[in-house]
Image (cartoon, coloured by chain):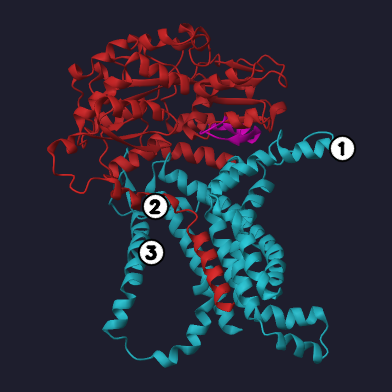
Chain colours: A cyan, B red
Amino acid sequence: MAGLAAAPVAAEGSNAFRRRPGLAAWLVMAPLLAWLILFIVIPTVMLVVVSFTQRDALGRVVYDFTLENYVRAFDWVWLKVLLVSIWYALLTTVICMAVGYPAAYFIGRSPARWRGILLMLVMVPFWTSFLIRTYAWITILSTDGLLNGLLVASGLFAKPVPLLYTPFAIVLGLVYNFLPFMILPIYTSVERLDGAMIEAAYDLGARPMRAFAQVIIPLTQPGIAAGALMVFIPSICMFAITTLMGGGANPTIGEVIFKQFTAGRNQPFGAALGTLLLVIFVIALSATRRQREES
Amino acid sequence: MKINLTLISTFAALALAGCGKAPETKTAEEPKTQPAFPAASPTSESKKLNVFCWSEYIPQAVIDQFSKETGIAVSVENYASNEEMLAKLLAGGGSYDVIQPSEYVVGALAKEGLLRPIDQAAVPNIKNIDPKFLSMSFDPGNKFSVPFMAGTVGIVINTETVTDDIKTFNDVFQEKYKGRIVVLDDAREIVTWGLLSMGIPVNDMSDANLDKVKPVLTKWLPLIKVYDSDSPKTALLNGDVDLGVVWGGEGAILLNENKKFKWVIPAEGTHLFIDSLAIPKTAKNPENAEAFMNFILRPDISKQISDAFPYLNPNLAARELLSPAQRSNIASFPSDDQLAKMQTFEDIGQQASKVDEVVTSLKVQ
């Protein structure tokens, strides 16, 4: 996330580094380059290559060229799954933004000695594995669970409400798990926010709403964009939470791809779906990037 | 202070990024505990066994006891589905000595010449196995596999909330039970129940039969609330659902847990699975693998496995060691009449992907 937020700064200063990098620079870069090639470039190339192949009865990849996987991927069944996943991810991003922005702003504007503690509080739950926290939600939300017990005992509801295994539970699980990814980048932007700018807005007669909309939001925009991407993208492909808390009745694209690589014994088709998802991410990324450059 | 904060947020970001990677750190530390010169003694190489088995199927105590008795160091890797195991085995990543495939995968692997014949003399304990589970169609003469555990798929009912007499799959999937049903998250199983309800043999997964079964599943799937293969009992125990079509072992645990649960073998018949132990052709320690198989088939060991995972134990000598309550658990041990009506799976090869598509398309209808 630091990389995303820092990108514009690097771009501004890039004129100073127009020289060709020397051997020492390459040596310093080597571990990073090796990491990128090994864990990003090669797997992506493999994914794309496999998406054009066929498979045998045991599910082994047979390297014969075919477009069949892509023809199949554009079937309405899979597009519907993709649309549902995008919908969940959008909803998650919007809710994370609505909850995360005030939280990040509050932390970023609070006295310096408090900030560390407050950030720590955001992070503490994430020292436990997300699977354990997801199972905890299951015991809270189930029909005989804590929350329903409380609701019924307090007389608010006569009967337990179905909470677990619903789209509500899916979005709740996603928001809960990805909220820090929204708070942290926005916090970084808010912390750098120059108080003088806000004062200037007030001096020039802006009311709080206008100062917020025309000064604070544009100045924290890099954090907002980074946060939105960091919530949106993993939300689309997340399958563990959606399966555990959603009960699997509303399959998401991550779950469908996972099934192709396992029970469906169809790696090429799974790879084709994965490649399409990758293309969508690249489009989303370049769109936000262009928007940022324009502003 | 500024530096301090930057440090904290960096740390926080690292904690986030690293939250899914804990096991990697663990493996990185492992080599430290191994001897510095593993090749120094020739025996160290042969005192190893790599077991690749289902999660929640072989108790750790059993593995530990094997190591203690034989001095063979066992490393265990788990999988959650036959296909996951196939994918890893065929990719040639690990060198596994023992795998635990279900019947149709034994058949498929044997056909492709990917299994190593078992030295029958090294596994004398196979005499403990019920002859009904020996020399089955997927592996005549048990050339490549020995039975580990068998089991069925059946219906569980919470009798406090469901008062009707449920006898068949069609009885489960009724409009009035909408949102109250849990089933296995397994496309082939679900299609199989549809086929059974229409009287079509379960291995006849032709396109024509898939088309025939679609209207049935179109009615069934919107009624289902939860799909869960790993622990379908959870939704039943938590009261989130009242009916389930689940593994026999899960059913047996539910029956032990609470008297309100009732187990029904569907009148149409059902699926009988046999999970076996086999040795891949690429195994490096086949003799240790055979020793492990023989150990697992020992009555006292097999009983321990049944205690933890109450499936249909094919080991007759072990069954004698079980308590009367365990033996009379109808979810673990179906009657002979019921067994006679059950069908085992054969490999359906590439059709698996189509079966998955049928079920996925009906989930999102």
Quadrant of residue B62 in the image? top left
Three-letter amino acid code of the residue under disc 3: Ile
Which residue is pictured at 18% across the width and 38% down the height?
B45
Marks 2 and 3 belong to one chain? no
Q: Quadrant of the C terminus of chain B?
A: top right
Q: Is B331 located above or below residue A197 in the figure?
A: above
Q: Is residue B299 visible to the viewer in this orientation of the structure?
A: yes
Q: Which residues are magenta?
A: B214-232
> Badge 1: few (under 14), some or many (20 or more) residues near its Cα, within 10 Å?
few
Which residue is pictured at 53% across the width and 71% down the height?
B7
Q: Is A17 located above or below residue A157 in the figure?
A: below
Which residue is pictured at 39% across the width and 49% down the height?
B26
Read off the chain for label 1.
A
Read off the chain for label 2.
B
Where disc 3 sits, the SS reads helix
Q: Is residue A251 visible to the viewer in this orientation of the structure?
A: no
Q: CA distance from mark 3 to mark 1?
A: 54 Å
In the image, A243 versus A133, the foreground residue is A133
Three-letter amino acid code of the residue under disc 2: Glu
Q: CA distance from mark 1 to mark 2?
A: 48 Å
Is B329 on the left-hand or right-hand side of B292? right
Where disc 1 sits, the SS reads loop
Residue A78 in picture, x, y percent from top left: 52, 50
Three-letter amino acid code of the residue under disc 1: Gly
Asked if the residue under mark 2 is in contact with the one under mark 1, i.e. CB atoms within 8 Å, the reply is no
Q: Is A116 located above or below residue A271 in the figure?
A: below
Quickly name the residue at label 3: A40
Quickly name the residue at label 1: A155
Q: Which mark is residue B24?
A: 2
Q: Quadrant of the N terminus of chain B?
A: bottom right
Marks 3 and 1 belong to one chain? yes
